[in-house]
Image: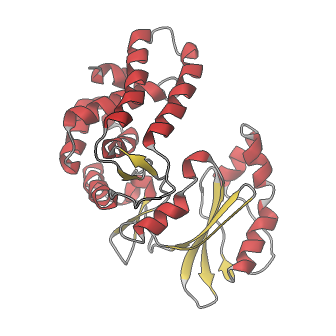
Amino acid sequence: MTGVTAFRMSTNLAEVAASGREPGLTEWAATLPSVVPELVARWELTVAEPYEPGGRSSWVAPATTSDGDPVVLKVGYRHTEAEHEAEGLRFWDGDGTVRLYEAATFDDTSALLLERAQPGTLLAHAVPPPEQDVVLAGLLRRLWRRPPAGHPFRTLASMCEYWARDFERRADAAPARYDRGLLREGVTLYRELPLTSDDDVLLCTDLHPDNIVAAVREPWLVIDPKPYVGDRTYDATQHMFNMDRLHEDPGALSDRMAALLDLDPERLRRWLFARCVQECPEWDGLYDVAVKLAP
């Protein structure tokens, strides 16, 4: 795409927009055929077809600048979790993450011009799961730094409180076999844990092997962070949700990640238990994991 030409929606985004489950996103997606060409003109880009199947709340495509530099154009629906992606990438400044070149927000749109990691192979498709653990742990240890005074980032405690209230609205619909005492214990812990950290750092909160890509500048780079400030132990949990090993032996998996990340293994188990409870009404199988991890 150069200038205003035919626009094509990526598959996942098109499906979510067509479903109507999120009316705001559906309305926003309808603006993309005009928004994307405006950004292309603003940043003087040549843009190819979007990555497939793509994200569920953003349109992302490889592009080239007028100087011939390879970049990525990411045009996203502004939503709570990703509110400070640009600020997080500026803070990390390419140290373990892709670099941010330009950013713009307007209406319901957040647009980023990013470094294009090449070849861009996802970690999830490149090496066996045990090696994925090691790569991810190495990246997290580099990213965990304290942001400066006056930073814009929200607290992990605020995020957990939001999702705890959401859980309470959904809990009555959980299957009858779910022990209500265990659910209450888990969501209470989910609220309490972020308040008991004495070493808060900037977190990715959504790091897993589908958000790590192969590059030339470094072997692996993080994409799509959702920055919050809080307990680093939380950041180890999302990766564990993306693997079968969580259901087979969650305690052993948690202990492995704690060792790789130099974290308190008991605290990580408590975080994993709390997160499994919070997610279980809508994430099949996590209740049984929570039972195995229950204190």
Q: Quadrant of residue 287?
A: top left
In this rendering, position of residue 146 left or right of residue 74: left
In this rendering, position of residue 40 left or right of residue 271: right
> Residue, x 27% and y 36% (percent of image)?
268
> Residue, x 47% and y 56% (percent of image)?
225
* Foreground pick, 8 / 238: 238
Residue 178, position in %: x, y? 44, 12
In this rendering, position of residue 117 left or right of residue 70: left
Q: Quadrant of residue 243?
A: top left
Image position of 19 with respect to 113: above or below: above
* Foreground pick, 151 / 11: 151
Q: Quadrant of the C terminus?
A: top left
Q: Residue furthest front?
A: 149
In this rendering, position of residue 209 left or right of residue 38: left
Q: Quadrant of the N terminus?
A: bottom right
Residue 11, position in %: x, y? 66, 54
Residue 211, position in %: x, y? 45, 56
> Residue, x 20% and y 36% (percent of image)?
265
Q: Does the rendering let one see residue 285? A: no
> Residue, x 44% and y 54% (percent of image)?
210
Q: Does the rendering let one see residue 178? A: yes
Image position of 69 with respect to 216: above or below: below
Image position of 139 with respect to 171: above or below: below
